[in-house]
Image (spheres, helix red, strand yellow):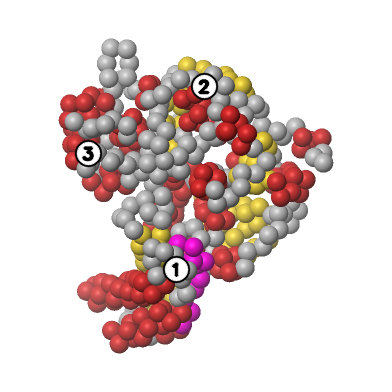
């Protein structure tokens, strides 16, 4: 039996957080994966489901500005946090500069890893606008691409660094 | 749309204690159907792989105050168990006082996983890649069981883990700035070998921390090795061969033999124990050789 004080420590079955700048409040089991919250509850399907063990980076999102694998993150860990998905990067008129660079430099083929790649690049440039190749490799080592051979992706990153990849930031 | 039915069925209840005492109380009440949860990156991976059952209850250690943060103490560093691996990796204090740990943490998973994962979680894994570094650093683990503070060396924990419902609250790393008048030089090396360069599970992990005197002799050394599912432990025979000695080529050959002899890795279908032994011996000998060369060049 759990005593009365401890019984009050059960996590809420309601997730309150901010997603792409808008407040969100949904009734959900606290251990639901953030990936499911985004794709199934909020219909934000730009965040991709792939390996589901945090290795491939297809489900990368920002939580309070830091990249995390949404397949490894649970709803209770997002309470009160600001979540940014690929849908939250562009504004109504314009793609985010990192998205624009991927488009112009051919940073994708099938496109499945691209939302996660772009999220990781944005997070890296927010933290360090002029990363070295070693720092790029470290920041991007959690994002796998099975099509491009990474050449186009590295070209897109180089271009994003060149133009300064973080205007229109929220 | 309703959430995925399978996921709903598998969703554990989450408890958010505010103190260590409450967390231990919950664990004792909920028993074997519950698990402490830190960054949860390992737990979720084990659930997906089917190597661990999804518990009915999760006890969130993230809701307890004061379990994260890095601070200087009289005797070195104190790192709260809920400090993320990214915080350890980026900490100036860790970089300065325990660069061996900074190197080890950098080699664990990728950036996004390190943002979630905690140093305490990696220690609790026992075969986590920070553990050889913590053993080489002679780190001490600080546990609380609700009322009592318990101190235990990282080495002791790795060799004989307790199943008590205590909570790891911090990792203490000894060693201050050192004596500024001494000519002794600290050296360290961390090497992890996996099947690819980055974001890879380890096959062999080696950590070395030592002190080289001005005359070229070694006055202190700790070497630890782990990797894969091998419980990290010290390579004491290699240490004994080096203590009080200089890093001569003939001595390093003996050290190589001693590592081959003492390191007892767990094999898997991808890498034999012989391969792992040879890799560990090569890594230790090469790291010591590199140290001897850089000292000779500076000397």
Of the pair A156 and B299, the residue shown nearer to us: A156
Residue matched to label 3: A148
Residue B177 in percent (x, y) is at: 44, 63
Q: CA distance from mark 2 to mark 1?
A: 44 Å
Question: Tag 3's secondary structure?
Answer: loop
Give the residue at x 45% y 20%.
A43
Residue B238 in percent (x, y) is at: 42, 81
Circle nearer the viewer, 2 or 1: 1
Sequence-wise, which precedes: disc 2 or disc 3?
Answer: 2
Q: Are marks 2 and 3 in contact (CB under 8 Å)?
A: no
Quadrant location of the C terminus of chain A in the rendered image: top left
Q: Chain of mark 2?
A: A
Q: Chain of mark 3?
A: A
Give the residue at x 67% y 62%.
B162
Of the pair B211 and B137, the residue shown nearer to us: B137
Q: Chain of mark 1?
A: B
Disc number for residue A41? 2
Where, by quadrant of the figure, is residue A143 drawn? top left
Asked whether residue B21 is in view, the answer is: no
Left or right: residue A142 compared with residue B231: left
Disc number for residue B267? 1
Left or right: residue A16 compared with residue B86: right
Q: CA distance from mark 2 to mark 3?
A: 32 Å
Of the pair B137 and B107, the residue shown nearer to us: B107
Tell me where the magenta segment starts and ends, as one range. B225-237
């Amino acid at each position: 039996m759990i005593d009365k004080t401890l019984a009050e420590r059960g996590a809420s079955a309601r997730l309150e957080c901010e997603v792409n700048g808008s407040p969100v409040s949904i009734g959900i089991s606290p251990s639901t994966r953030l990936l499911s919250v985004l794709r199934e509850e909020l219909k934000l399907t730009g965040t991709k489901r792939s390996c589901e063990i945090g290795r491939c980076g297809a489900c990368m999102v920002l939580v309070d500005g830091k990249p995390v694998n949404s397949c490894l993150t649970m709803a209770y860990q997002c309470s009160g946090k600001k979540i940014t998905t690929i849908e939250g990067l562009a504004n109504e008129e314009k793609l985010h500069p990192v998205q624009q660079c991927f488009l112009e430099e051919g940073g994708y083929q099938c496109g499945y890893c691209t939302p996660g790649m772009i999220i990781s690049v944005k997070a890296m440039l927010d933290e360090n606008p002029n990363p070295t190749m070693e720092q790029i490799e470290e920041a991007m080592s959690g994002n796998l691409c099975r099509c491009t051979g990474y050449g186009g992706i590295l070209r897109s990153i180089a271009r994003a660094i060149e133009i300064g990849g973080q205007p229109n930031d929220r | 749309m309703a959430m995925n039915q399978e996921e709903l069925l598998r969703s554990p209840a989450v408890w958010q204690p505010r103190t260590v005492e409450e967390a231990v109380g919950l664990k004792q009440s909920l028993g074997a159907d519950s698990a402490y949860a830190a960054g949860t990156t390992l737990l979720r991976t084990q659930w997906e792989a089917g190597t661990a059952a999804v518990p009915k209850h999760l006890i969130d250690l993230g809701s307890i105050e004061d379990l994260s943060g890095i601070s200087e103490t009289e005797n070195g560093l104190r790192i709260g168990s809920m400090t993320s691996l990214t915080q350890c990796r980026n900490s100036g204090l860790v970089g300065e006082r325990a660069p061996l740990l900074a190197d080890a943490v950098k080699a664990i998973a990728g950036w996004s996983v390190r943002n979630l994962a905690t140093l305490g979680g990696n220690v609790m894994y026992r075969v986590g890649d920070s553990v050889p570094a913590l053993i080489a650093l002679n780190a001490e683990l600080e546990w609380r069981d609700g009322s009592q503070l318990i101190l235990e060396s990282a080495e002791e924990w790795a060799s004989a883990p307790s199943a008590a419902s205590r909570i790891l609250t911090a990792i203490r790393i000894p060693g201050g700035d050192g004596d500024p008048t001494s000519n002794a030089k600290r050296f360290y090396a961390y090497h992890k070998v996996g099947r690819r360069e980055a974001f890879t599970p380890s096959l062999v992990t080696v950590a070395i921390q030592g002190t080289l005197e001005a005359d070229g002799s070694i006055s202190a050394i700790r070497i630890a090795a782990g990797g894969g599912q091998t419980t990290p432990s010290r390579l004491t025979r290699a240490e004994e061969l080096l203590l009080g000695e200089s890093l001569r080529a003939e001595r390093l050959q003996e050290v190589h033999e001693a590592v081959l002899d003492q390191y007892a890795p767990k094999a898997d279908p991808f890498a034999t124990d012989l391969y792992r032994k040879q890799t560990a011996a090569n890594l230790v000998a090469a790291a010591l050789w590199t140290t001897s060369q850089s000292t000779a060049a500076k000397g």
